[in-house]
Image (cartoon, coloured by chain):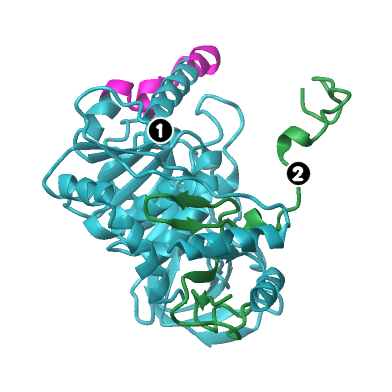
Amino acid sequence: MILPAVRERLEAVLRHAAMEGALAALRSGASHISITGLHDVAKALVASYLTRELRRPAFFVTDSNRRAEALAETLRFFSGIFPGAAGGVATLPAFDRLPWESQSPHADILERRAATLFRVADGQISLVIAPIAAALWRYQDPAAYLYLTRTLAKDTEIPHEDLITHLGSVGYTRTEMVELPGQFAVRGGIIDVFSPEAARPVRIELLGDSVESVREFDARTQRSIAPVVRTTLLSLTEWSVPAPEKANLNDAAWETPSFFGPPGEPGPSTLFELAESSLRPIVFLDEPQTLREAAAKHLAAATENYERHGRANSPAAAHYFWSEEEFAAALEKTSQIHIEQLALGIGSTPQFELSSRPSARFHGNVVACMGDVKSQLASGGTVFLTGRKHRRDRTLCRHLSRV
Amino acid sequence: MPYVLGESEDAAAGFTAEGAHESAAMLLIRAPFPEGVTFPDARLTLFGHADLFDVTHPPSSVPAARFALPVSSAILPS
């Protein structure tokens, strides 16, 4: 558990005039501000702090999946120190394939998107990290994502066949024995299910149309471990694919899910409308100029891909993605915070500068590092030394006790 | 050198409380970022976990590969 001393020392930075000015502007209703001078760790610290202070749903938009992944752990770390209203932080990856390509998106991306969309719609997430390609996607109504997940507890009413049909329609694979996430098995009134992101699978015992018990079990030995109060069965896809009318429920064969959604109506919601809150969302735009270029490039690639690979009845790019103009209009309904290293913004956006720079690197030279630390402490500064592995933490403590 | 543990003992199993001082201006904590940041105005530095221990050389000192891989390598899909 992180101790209060950490938060107190970091708040000393966040009481800087730039941060107080930025907070005051946002609290008084400013729709755009820019905070400059920020390197990566500083961006994560500032975003977590503002999310905690403003108590509104927040979105952190990056230019790519890779960048979102790189920042996610650091954002989680600072959000642990400065938790938002709902507490959670989640990454919403963009699809790694376009809808007109012959290959399906990676299963891990499908799972993570479905889990994040449910959690956002359910109000469990304070800060969503999303690349611009995911932010440009046209989403369904939030209720659609809630519908894909089932929470079961003792005495929950759910017909046996409905549960089996539902699991098949949200991407679970029916097997003889459940060993991996995304699998389910049926033996009479007992249904074993391994939900994505769950530590263990659960054994649901149905009596008629009612849940009699829910127990965790060991996937290796198949033995029950302990009863659980309730279980949440997350979807593996963000779309429900109904089973064919004549499907035999005892058959493992299900229709292949349509990974990019039904070809009917385009999704009506933007990413920023998914949060279960009536408060105006905050959107952190990581280097807005880079985002603009990435958005234009992504939409051009989608149009080109449609023209090259789309079939006669394939929906066009506008079916799946918001245009740049539509996306800009969606951003106008949020509080935009441009977070930038350099002050590149031109125009009337209020700018606040919080100067930061990368810390020095010592490449294993502990003596030089300790000299630098001593010098900073002597001038009244505060220093955080961080470790990642236990062995190195102990090494660090040993060095400190000798200095 | 006096320091404060930034985590409780349970969570910071690798750290030792020996030598820790409540009033110290140096904090030890486990964090996920390899490269840290300095805020000069606030006189605060968060060193990343690779800033001290990572002994790899800066990228500029790594010699360039002598041969480039052919684009149509047999191990890559065409």
Mark 2–mark 1 Cα distance, whole angstroms, equals 28 Å
The amino acid on which the numbered mark 2 sits, given as a three-letter code, is His
Whether residue A306 is in magenta: the answer is yes
Q: Which residue is mark 2?
A: B57
What residue is at 44 percent from the left and 58 percent from the top? B44
Tell me residue A378's x, y (percent): 49, 65
Tell me residue A257's x, y (percent): 51, 42
Taking depth in this image into account, of B40 and A300 the one nearest to the observer is B40
**What crowding class fits label 1: few (fewer than 14 Cα within 10 Å), some (14-19), or many (20 or more)?**
many
In the picture, which chain is green? B
Whether residue A383 is in magenta: the answer is no
What residue is at 58 percent from the left and 84 percent from the top? B17
Number of callouts: 2
**What crowding class fits label 2: few (fewer than 14 Cα within 10 Å), some (14-19), or many (20 or more)?**
few
The amino acid on which the numbered mark 1 sits, given as a three-letter code, is Glu
Where are the magenta residues, as a range? A304-325
In the picture, which chain is cyan? A
Q: Is residue A394 left or right of residue A122?
A: right
Q: Which chain does the numbered disc 1 sit on?
A: A
- Residue A174 visible to an observer of this rendering: no
Q: Which residue is mark 1?
A: A287
Secondary structure under tag 1 reads: loop
